[in-house]
Image (spheres, rainbow, N blue to C red):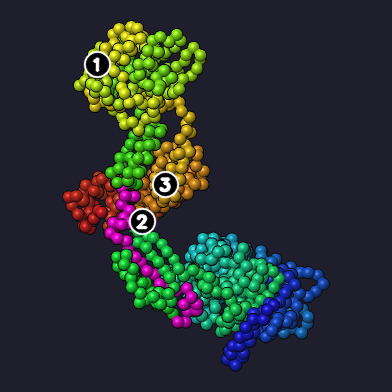
């Protein structure tokens, strides 16, 4: 291994020297422990039990404690501990449930001293008392803890944790009779060795098994715990109830935790799986490790600081069959890799920018940008000079406010509250949302809703009054103006004499369908005419000519006083070429001989002048056939949704998705829809639009989104009289047999929305409380409290 820097430490007459080094073991290690003088380390595992001397340049094997011809399960160690008062005394926890003590002072080759076989399952942890030489404590998978007196052959006390298994036990350094134990159910218990019948205190420390714990060497009552929930927590046990002081979030289950000597807020951790590194954390800054050791290639199983008063050397054993000594000075510093710059927009447009303090200090004399409405505000944290790596990850924060009204998001809130997403026909939803967008000044969005209505909704039949010019005497739609026509005969000159004359003398027998349901015009050649697949009932022409009049066919009489239905030319597709010269009255008189009008109809037809302002068209049917393919516009609508999403208007994309439903949902992949939904819901929740957010979740068809409002739906209710939890599903308490939720106004049970005063806890039906507080500010229950509803 490459030679690293060397450190020499003086500890009360003794000197510790060394460097970062490692040695290869014969088998994977499960635990390690250091002797009192920090000169030797013991390594234990299923197939290894050796003592190594820690020299300046390397580890040197001193003693192999696995002796004998036959392998014994007593030598398969899950844990090992070296007594800190007697350098010849060791204890191991065997996987077969045996606790073994070892006396290195024995002259024989076999150093085994005593065997305690009282545990029924694997012993996970053994611990010597810090000041009492003959007291040994063990915790087993069978859920029991046993206290042994090494001068006797049996245990002196048995502690039952009422749990499946004990994962760790540790004697308190400051309290002579106290020890802590951790369990797989997430609990931590504090015991007095003089009272084995019950624990002194118990609390839930982690969400899942608690694998390890360690008492602080200096601060009395500080207990660090690590669990499968990937957290390290520091508890203050001096208070009446255990108080969580710090919490460190790691990336894997925490297998071992050890406080760093001479550094009050530092502790080292290693993981049970996945992560092979060893981290040293400053609990005051729990998000980035203060140091990291990356020498191991497999899971680290044991860590120990070399000396209780030296913070420079850390020893570790691993499943990669290696033993390492880590020099703290050689540790990598993740803080150096942290990005000290950051940029983020606030909810209402404010901009926050973080940068290195050195950069900010260098530009402290710069003039503010003229576009800034005010100088940025700098938030600087006072640094602790003793804190390592403090300056490397320190940033200054600048906050820039937006111009008044420049980044306002009121339109987003108004749109979310006023949009209609379901419960009405599609046409009404599009019209309503277009109106909302238009009122908020979002004309492009309003036009998009209008186009969606035009694409997916048929305009339907116009009112009778608007179609009076084409009504016949036989019914509501006697003779339509131009029900069906041959565009070949109409183009290119709609009103030319040659075309009309040709229709008189043409020898062909053209077939004309006058039924309004007909959509196809054929001739004797069985040829489909242009535009025959779409029925269009209109007459188009520009009103120009000698008399500025347009003569329409009317079976009976004209209705000049009734309004006409007028549409812009851009609202429909042109079916034929528009001529500049309108047909004169003499041409329309020949209409009786045209193949478009039967003889009997021509006899009763009359010419009626129309006001010159009527210049466009009259519609009695849809502008396009409803039998167009459903996916005719799908590509266009899909691109439109992606356009709005890329522009940042995810609100429009999600609203259209919900309103159109299956018409467009099948054209957009599920992952994109889920991303849009979650982004929009996140925005709604940031603006505290909880009802709108819940409505969007309910209307979503994505499984990942629709289940969002199904989590954490349990409501825990306590009885308002006896203050005990309501265990039943009814409204009556099982203990005091009284109704739990009574309205203070009507004195009936509240089964729906309940509102209460946070000052006196009285309440009732929402409408009743609101009406009561309109006339009085005193609590309706008569408690005398001045309630306020906001």
Residue drawn at point x = 41 percent, y = 14 percent = 513
Q: Residue 227, image x and y in percent? A: 55, 65
Give the number of the disc on residue 608. 1
- Res 533 quadrant in image: top left
Per the rendered image, the range of residues in magenta is: 385-414
Give the number of the disc on residue 723. 2
- Res 239 quadrant in image: bottom left
Please name which of the two marks, 1 or 3, marks the residue nearer to the observer: 1
Please name which of the two marks, 1 or 2, marks the residue nearer to the observer: 1
Q: Is residue 708 visible?
A: no
Q: Residue 39, image x and y in percent? A: 66, 85
Residue drawn at point x = 60 percent, y = 73 percent = 293
Vertical relation: 358 (above or below) 616: below
- Tell me whether circle 2 and circle 3 mark residues in contact (CB < 8 Å): no
Give the number of the disc on residue 644. 3
Using residue 657 as the reference point, say whether residue 437 is left or right of it: left
Along the polypeptide, which appears first: circle 1 or circle 3? Answer: 1
Using residue 62 as the reference point, say whether residue 766 is left or right of it: left
User: 572 or 750, which lies in front?
Assistant: 572
């Amino acid at each position: 291994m490459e030679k690293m820097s060397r450190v020499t430490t003086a500890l009360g007459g003794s000197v510790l020297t060394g460097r970062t080094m490692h040695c290869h073991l014969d088998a994977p290690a499960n635990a390690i422990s250091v002797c009192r003088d920090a000169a030797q380390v013991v390594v234990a595992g299923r197939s290894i039990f050796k003592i190594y001397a820690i020299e300046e340049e390397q580890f040197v094997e001193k003693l192999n404690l696995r002796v004998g011809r036959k392998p014994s399960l007593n030598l398969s160690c899950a844990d090992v501990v070296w007594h800190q008062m007697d350098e010849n005394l060791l204890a191991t926890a065997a996987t077969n449930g045996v606790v073994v003590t070892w006396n290195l002072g024995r002259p024989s080759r076999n150093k085994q001293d005593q065997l305690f076989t009282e545990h029924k399952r694997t012993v996970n942890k053994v611990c010597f008392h810090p000041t009492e030489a003959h007291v040994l404590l063990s915790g087993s998978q069978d859920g029991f803890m046993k206290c042994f007196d090494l001068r006797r052959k049996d245990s002196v006390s048995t502690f039952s944790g009422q749990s499946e298994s004990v994962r760790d036990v540790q004697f308190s350094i400051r309290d002579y009779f106290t020890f802590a134990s951790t369990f797989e159910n997430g609990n931590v218990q504090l015991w007095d060795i003089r009272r084995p019948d019950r624990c002194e205190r118990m609390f839930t420390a982690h969400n899942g098994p608690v694998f390890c714990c360690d008492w602080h060497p200096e601060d009395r009552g500080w207990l660090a715990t690590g669990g499968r929930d990937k957290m390290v927590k520091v508890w203050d046990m001096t208070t009446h109830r255990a108080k969580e002081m710090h919490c460190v979030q790691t990336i894997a289950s925490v297998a071992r935790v050890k406080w760093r000597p001479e550094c009050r807020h530092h502790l080292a951790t290693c993981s049970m799986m996945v992560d092979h590194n060893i981290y040293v954390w400053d609990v005051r800054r729990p998000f980035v490790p203060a140091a990291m050791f990356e020498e191991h290639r497999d899971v680290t199983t044991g860590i120990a600081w070399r000396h209780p008063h030296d913070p420079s050397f850390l020893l570790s054993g691993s499943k990669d069959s290696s033993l390492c000594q880590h020099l703290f000075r050689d540790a990598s510093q993740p803080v150096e890799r942290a990005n000290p710059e950051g940029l983020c927009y606030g909810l209402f447009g404010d901009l926050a920018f973080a940068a290195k303090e050195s950069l900010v200090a260098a530009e402290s004399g710069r003039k503010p940008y003229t576009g800034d409405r005010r100088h940025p505000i700098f938030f600087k944290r006072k640094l602790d000079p003793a804190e390592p790596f403090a300056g490397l990850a320190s940033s200054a924060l600048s906050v820039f406010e937006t111009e008044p009204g420049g980044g306002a998001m009121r339109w987003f809130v108004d749109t979310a509250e006023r949009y209609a997403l379901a419960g009405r026909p599609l046409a009404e939803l599009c019209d309503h949302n277009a109106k909302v967008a238009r009122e908020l000044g979002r004309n492009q969005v309003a036009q998009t809703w209008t186009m969606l209505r035009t694409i997916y909704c048929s305009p339907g039949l116009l009112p009778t009054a608007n179609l009076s010019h084409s009504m016949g005497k036989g019914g509501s739609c006697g003779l339509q103006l131009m029900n069906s026509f041959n565009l070949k005969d109409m183009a290119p000159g709609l009103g030319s004499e040659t075309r009309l004359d040709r229709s008189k003398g043409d020898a062909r027998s053209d077939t004309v369908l006058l039924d309004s349901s007909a959509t196809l015009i054929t001739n004797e050649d069985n040829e489909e005419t242009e535009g025959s697949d779409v029925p269009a009932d209109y007459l188009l022409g520009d009103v120009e000519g000698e008399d500025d009049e347009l003569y329409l066919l009317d079976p009976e009489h004209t209705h000049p006083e009734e309004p006409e239905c007028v549409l812009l030319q851009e609202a429909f597709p042109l079916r034929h070429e528009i001529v500049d010269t309108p047909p004169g009255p003499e041409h329309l008189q020949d209409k009786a001989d045209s193949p478009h009008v039967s003889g009997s109809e021509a006899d009763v037809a009359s010419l009626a002048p129309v006001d010159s302002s009527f210049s466009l068209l009259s519609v009695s049917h849809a502008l396009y056939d409803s039998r167009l393919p459903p996916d005719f516009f799908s590509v266009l609508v899909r691109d439109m949704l992606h356009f709005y999403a890329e522009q940042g208007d995810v609100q429009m994309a999600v609203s259209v998705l919900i309103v159109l439903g299956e018409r467009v949902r099948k054209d957009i992949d599920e992952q994109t829809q889920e991303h849009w939904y979650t982004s929009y819901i996140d925005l709604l929740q940031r603006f505290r639009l909880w009802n709108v957010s819940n409505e969007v979740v309910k209307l979503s068809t994505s499984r990942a989104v629709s289940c969002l409002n199904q989590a954490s739906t349990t409501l825990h209710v306590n009885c308002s009289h006896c203050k005990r939890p309501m265990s039943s599903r009814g409204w009556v308490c099982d203990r005091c047999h009284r109704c739990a939720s009574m309205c203070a106004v009507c004195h009936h049970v509240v089964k729906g929305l309940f509102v209460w005063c946070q000052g006196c806890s009285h309440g009732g039906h929402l409408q009743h409380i609101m009406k009561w507080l309109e006339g009085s500010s005193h609590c309706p229950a008569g408690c005398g409290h001045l309630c306020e509803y906001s």
